[in-house]
Amino acid sequence: MSRTRSVTSSVLGVDRRTVLAATAAVSVSAGVGYALRPTDSEAAPAAQVPAARPEPAAAGPRASAAPAAAPLAPFTKGTTLASVAAPRPGSGYRRLDSQPGWGRVVRGDLAAPKSGRAGRRTTLAAFVQLTDLHLIDSQHPMRLEYLRAASEISWRPHEALTVQGAVSLVERVNALRAAPVTGAPLDFVVTTGDNTDNNARTELDWYLTVMSGGRITPNSGDPRHYEGVQNSGVPLYWQPDSASRDAYKQRGFPRLDGFLAAAIREVRSPGLTLPWYSTVGNHDAMPLGCYAHGDSWLAEYAVGGRKLMELTPAEAVRLQRSISEDRDPRGTVLRDLLKSTARAQRAVTPDERRAPYTPAEHVRAHLDPVYRGAGPVGHGYTRANLEAGTQYYSFPIAENVLGISLDTTDPGGHYNGSIGTAQLTWLDATLRAHRDQYAVVFSHHTSESMSNTRPDPAHPRERRHEGAELVALLGRHRNVVAWVNGHIHRNDITPHRGSAGSFWEVSTASHVEFPQLARVVELVDNKDGTLSVHTTLIESAAPHRTDFGDLSQTGLASLYRELSANARSDGARLSGEARDRNTELLLKRR
């Protein structure tokens, strides 16, 4: 059977007609002390880090923001201050409805709030954080859906609709005419990783097109038919087009004739109207977010014509433990399992577009003019990143605010992260060079999830550093005000007191698990010796109420949210406490 040819952009077509025979060829050099900015064309040694004030660039967020046509005023429409989607009372499958919004909680853990600050404040920056979009090629042979036999959270019944859901989130961001608290223009959008799910080229193309604008067909393999677990007849999964009483229909999930055909139809994204920046997560860096590159057999399997769709509970538990207990960073257990179950696997259409992409290909794709959208070129990444083999950089947020995007993934394998000495040294030098500017740091992993210090195969002698060491470094710089991240799929806000300064760690829930949120962040000077970091959660633009008869792009985006609300029993905890949602976080002004 011939393999489906790629129709995606040329940059993702590098060697596309051949399988990635040896992804071990990924050469990610340390890039010791390199300062990488969107305006740089070459990497610069740490000793030559640019002066504190960044050059005003035409692609800079503040320069491209439209000026306010009227006096600034709060803009809460479309935010969770106004309303939130929530399940109706009852048991079994629960429909969603609109409920009153979440109020704002003032947190004085690091500085006491002073009266009258709302009338004095000036805006320093305002931006939108998206995180953990997890755009999923749900028919990909490497997916681990069969772990559903061991745990309900190992597979999601809404996985075929991630593209429709992400486009609806872009539509929401585009509809935000101003920042919710200050009414200031929004400067930019930043993702904090896990933009893709399987480290597949199909997903990378879909993500970049969602963000930049264009047409997407969220399908791979057979261009005419869906070939995945949701029409397999396996009762472990929701079979939406079938009358069979699968495990999900027994819980009240509906039968939706035509669902799978609708899920793989062409989708149109308007693209973000704001400049946007990209941060790498473990699912973007490694196959399945946990296996190091380098196994040519697994790379071949990813584009091949066989797919495993079910395991016994005992087999699923063994594989799940090998991942969660960090006993299989190179995918050896998975490879042996797939080889031993060859006869039980089902035939699917091979597709070379499903091949894993390397870090260099990840950066190169961002630099492709096809995906420029609202800019800037590279969305933070530069040709200097390609030359240095790095995926971290700094960029100007506003006149007095610097953004820093880190790479906290560990190329050695496993889903938790760490940071290498070279990058840590670069970060320290960058913060020192910009000591006269406030700094907002972005990464995928949280401080608590940076616990994996397995050596980078490309740099086995380089030390890896845990989250506590990164917290300590940030705390030594008085200009750091916030560290914004994701990974844990839960809203969580933590204050950190350092040796020289204090900052807030802001972790935001994913857009693949309910409640499917993103976050607007506003940094203001209260003109009283304090700063405030305002955080406001937003949902996608899709209606809260679903119509099972509406399988349009918008209807599927609504269904995406409702299915996610019914996918797992512990979903409510992911929204966090009130103190982790809509907040005002105070800091002492440096």
Image (cartoon, rainbow, N blue to C red):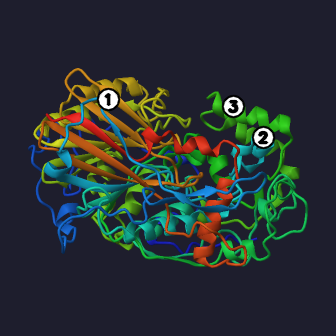
Where is residue 32? Give x, y as percent: 27, 35
Circle nearer the viewer, 1 or 2: 1
| Location of mark 1 (residue) | 109
What amino acid is found at the position of numbered circle 2 in the picture?
Leu
Query: Picture quarter containing residue 141?
Result: bottom right
Q: Residue at x 76, y 45 (%)?
A: 148
Q: Please identify the quadrant where the N terminus is shown.
A: bottom right
Depth check: 175 or 432 in front? 175
Q: Amino acid at mark 3?
A: Ser
Question: Where, by quadrant of the figure, is residue 443 drawn?
Answer: top left
Vertical comparison of 244 with 549: above or below: above
* Residue indicated by mark 2: 337
Q: Nearer the viewer, residue 173 or 290?
A: 173
**Label located before the other in sequence (1 or 3):** 1
Q: Are marks 1 and 2 in contact (CB under 8 Å)?
A: no
Which residue is at the front of the view, 62 or 102?
102
**How far, Cα to Cα, is label 1 from label 3?**
40 Å
Give above or below for 68 relative to 52. below
- Give the residue drawn at x 25%, y 38%: 481
Distance from disc 3 to disc 2, alpha carbons, whole Å, reads: 12 Å
Residue identified by numbered label 3 = 322
